[in-house]
Image: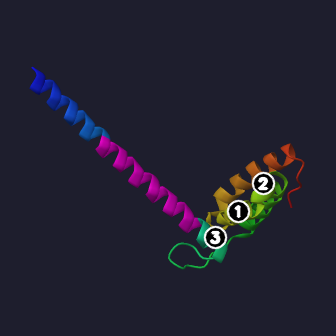
Amino acid sequence: MGIGCGGLLLLSAAGGIASYFYMRSQADAMLSAAEAAASAAATGNAPGGVPISGTPMCAKAAACCKATMAKTAGPNAAAGEQACNGVLMLSEDVCAKQYEAYKRAATLVSATCP
């Protein structure tokens, strides 16, 4: 009986360790993807080096995002502005929805959207 319980204890410990490393690798992958997207937005290129075109609605949404970030981000305003540039990689219909959301957020913080 002691050997069976000890085996189950070792098996559960191994499973816990394996799940920890799996979750850590997934978190690292998401972090590197987010860093790549932020870098792409900062350089004006989508992942793979494709230039970001940005439709007029996406430019409007990005400008509204930046206006809101300027009011709320404080010392992290530069990072917030780079994050807003990621809007330029979205489709026209998604940008329209984002603009409406940013516009509502801007009214809450007394910012003005273009």
Please tell me whether mark 2 sits on a helix, a strand or a loop.
loop
Local crowd size for mark 3, using a 10 Å CA cut-off: few (<14), some (14–19), many (≥20)? many
Amino acid type, callout 3: Ala
Which residue corresponds to mark 3? 41
Front position in the image: 20 or 78: 20
**Closer to us: 6 or 52:** 6
Q: Which residue is mark 1?
A: 79
Q: For residue 54, what is the image quadrant? A: bottom right
> Which of the two labelled residues, at mark 1 and mark 3, occupies the earlier sequence position?
3
Name the residue at 50% across, 76% down: 48
Which residues, given as a range, are shown in magenta? 17-37
Residue that badge 2 annotates: 73
- Residue 19 included in the magenta stretch of the image: yes
Q: Amino acid at mark 2?
A: Ala
Q: Position of residue 43 (x, y in %)?
A: 64, 77
Q: Give the main secondary structure of the magenta stretch.
A: helix
Evaluate whether residue 1 shows in this view.
yes
Expressed as whole percent of the image width and height from the top left, the position of residue 104 reads: 80, 46
At numbered mark 1, what does the secondary structure look like: helix, strand or loop?
helix
Which of the two labelled residues, at mark 2 and mark 1, occupies the earlier sequence position?
Answer: 2
Q: Are the residues at dot 2 and dot 1 in contact (C-beta closer than 8 Å)?
A: yes
Disc 1 residue type (three-letter): Ala
